[in-house]
Image (cartoon, rainbow, N blue to C red):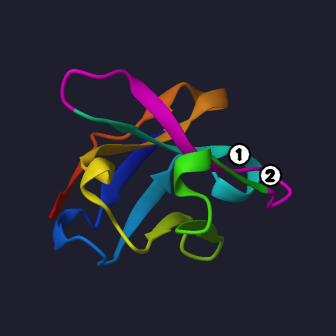
Amino acid sequence: QVQLVESGGGLVQAGGSLRLSCAASGTAVSGNVIAWYRQAPGKQRDLVAQITVTGRTNFTDSVKDRFTISRDIAKNTVYLQMNNLQPEDTAVYYCNAPLRAAWGQGTQVTVSS
């Protein structure tokens, strides 16, 4: 059974940084596409970033140059480093392994102005 557990969310002021973690079990992050999504209140869940099996990364335009995604194969964990956070980044952030149909429980990120 594939499980994804997010952590690292919290409250931060605008311009601050957070690093989210997605710890996987039951599958290897090195053998999967791992994506981060976010969902703000009353809005749909949107793709933020993803890392492919080959390590290629993709980002939605609104976070390019501010967010990075990386993975630690030994820890079987994917990270989302978020810099220069803005109030519009406030959302619940979810980790996803699409080929495994697996989602984490989400972690709240709140950015105050």
On screen, residue 99 versus residue 6, left or right, reads: right
Q: Residues within 10 Å of mark 1 (few under 14, many from 20)?
A: some
Which residue, given by chain and number where applicable, does mark 2 sit on?
A: 53
Residue 14: x %, y % from top left: 24, 70
On screen, residue 108 versus residue 23, left or right, reads: left
- Asked whether the beta carbons under mark 2 and mark 1 sit within 8 Å of each other, the answer is yes
Q: Quadrant of residue 7?
A: bottom left
Against 86, residue 38 (above or below) is above
Residue 79: x %, y % from top left: 50, 67
| 76, 84: nearer the viewer | 84
- Asked if the magenta segment contains residue 45, the reply would be yes
Gap between marks 2 and 1, in whole Å? 5 Å
The disc label shown at residue 23, or none: none
Q: Identify residue type, mark 2.
A: Val
Regarding residue 1, the answer to whether it shows in the image is no
Magenta residues span: 41-56
| 2, 45: nearer the viewer | 45
Q: Secondary structure at mark 1?
A: loop
On screen, residue 90 versus residue 113, left or right, reads: right
Image mark count? 2
Residue 82: x %, y % from top left: 43, 69
Q: Identify residue type, mark 1.
A: Asn
Which residue, given by chain and number where applicable, does mark 1 sit on?
A: 32
Q: Residue at x 61, y 68 (%)?
A: 65
